[in-house]
Amino acid sequence: MKLPEKIIEVNQNQKKENEFWNQVYGGMSVEVEVGELLYALIRSTKPRIVVETGTGDFYSTAHILQAIADNGFGFLHTFDIKQKFNEHDYPEFNDKYIFYLGDALEMGKKLIRNLDVEPYQHLFPSTIDFIFLDSDHTYEQVTDEFNLFYPYLKVGGVICFHDTILDKREQKAVDEIRLRNDIEMIRLFTSRGLDVGVKLS
């Protein structure tokens, strides 16, 4: 797979800026390889609606948006309690996402209930196609985010959890989720852990 120039540029910046953290945890954003995997998953599953919690410095977000752009369709709803990125650095993605500044649970409820002022033609009940959860890794936050968004994930849709090896609180939450009968999950042993699930029913 040949990566787009924008992703190659973002990867190079990530490696430079997080050289120390890459040695310790694989970086404080998602690992470069996980970013590339996210890109590949979005390209291959071709979701119409993507939800991401934990925008961070826009690293994983850029991979998702580049895949959406290369697919030629799709839209991202991404949440974080802080804005750590400059949207002017990514003008090519401006019409492909909405950034929600605030807790993913509170802002996500507004998204689901159509209470926000943003244009909701991008989201209809039961039609989220891809979810990437990577905000606060407490047991409660992971569980509550899953319970909020998962009912709206379509059958066959994909959900990913990041840091499932690094953070034992997240690992506990995800290990409980994998016991459900309506989801099939696999744990990838990256340096920090990535669990990928598919909704079965």
Image: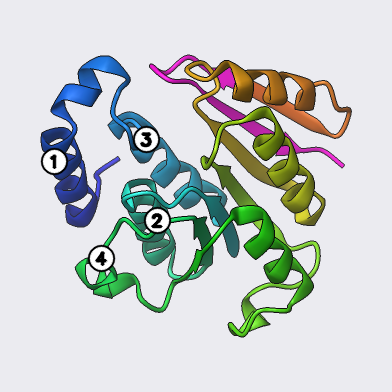
Camera-nearest residue between 59 and 36: 59
**What is the C-alpha distance between the residues marked 2 and 4?**
20 Å
**What is the C-alpha distance between the residues marked 1 and 4?**
18 Å
Instruction: Look at discs 1 and 4 and give the one toward the viewer.
Output: 4
**What is the C-alpha distance between the residues marked 3 and 4?**
18 Å
Q: Which residues are magenta?
A: 187-201
Q: Amino acid at mark 3?
A: Val
Q: Is the N terminus in the top left, top right, bottom left or bottom right quadrant?
A: top left
Q: Which residue is mark 3?
A: 30
Disc 4, SS? loop
**What is the C-alpha distance between the residues marked 1 and 3?**
13 Å
Residue at (73% x, 79% y) in the render: 115
Q: Quadrant of residue 170?
A: top right
Q: Earlier in the sequence, mark 2 or mark 1?
A: 1
Camera-nearest residue between 152 and 176: 176
Q: Earlier in the sequence, mark 3 or mark 4?
A: 3
**What is the C-alpha distance between the residues marked 2 and 1?**
18 Å
Q: Marks 3 and 1: in contact by CB < 8 Å?
A: no
Give the farthest residue toward the left: 16
Q: Amino acid at mark 4?
A: Asn
Q: Which residue is mark 1?
A: 12
Instruction: Look at discs 2 and 3 and give the one toward the viewer.
Output: 3
